[in-house]
Image: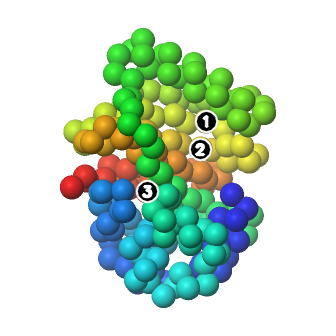
Amino acid sequence: MKKYAAVFVVLALAASASAKTYPSSFGYTFDAPDTSWLVLTKTELASNPVFASADAGLKAKVASGSIEILYDRATSDATFTDYVDVKLGPKGTVPGTPDAVKAACTAYSAKLAAVAKKPLAVTTCESRDVGTLKAFYVEYDGSVAGTVTMQYQIARPDGRLLYVTAVCKKTSLPKFRPDFEAIVKSIRFS
């Protein structure tokens, strides 16, 4: 997270020269508000000179296609960079029945506590639809104090899971959440 913040400081002054619709190396397109979001995908990395000074390790991850990152310049500040990261997971399914959702939520809470080495309050855990696709949604206190994490696990048409995770300051949530939800809802697989 600190690395993302350092990259944001370098990129914050640059204006995004990209269009509103972005292609992802994960086989979909999405829309991001082009006035406040800086989008770092494999395609953008190769075509946008603003990323020339980005952190080499982060650029390598994006160039390899292992992660994509969207920075919200409107809500980020010197204390924390509000962002969305996207990763492609293995083949899997999202829970489809109420019992399966309940079991997945219980398992998710336990896994979060183990990874964070402290309990993190899960505020929302449920099944959702993203267009015609099924998704599993979890929202919880972020591992950094004063932040919230929101994650969609979306079943792609090929059976692999797409993890779309947003982290923002709790104070940014009223502005950040609508943009995040709009980005997720705009996902279209080719």
**Mark number for residue 149?**
2
- Residue 135, quarter of the rendered image: top left
Residue at horizontal 32 percent and vertical 66 percent from the top: 23
Q: Position of 22 compared to 173: left or right?
A: left
Residue type marked 1: Tyr
Residue at horizontal 67 percent and vertical 47 percent from the top: 147
Crowd around label 1: few <14 · some 14–19 · many ≥20 (10 Å)? some
In what quadrant of the picture does the N terminus appear? bottom right
- Judged from the image, the secondary structure of the residue bearing numbered disc 3 is helix
**Mark number for residue 179?**
3
Does label 2 or label 1 sit earlier along the sequence? 1
Asked whether the residues under the numbered discs 2 and 1 touch, taking CB atoms below 8 Å apart as contact, a structural biologist would say: yes
In what quadrant of the picture does the C terminus appear? bottom left
Q: Which residue is mark 1?
A: 140
Residue type marked 2: Thr
* Image vertical order of residue 91 relative to residue 75, above or below: above
Residue closest to the far top: 99
* Image vertical order of residue 59 relative to residue 182, above or below: below
The label nearer to you, 3 versus 1, is 1
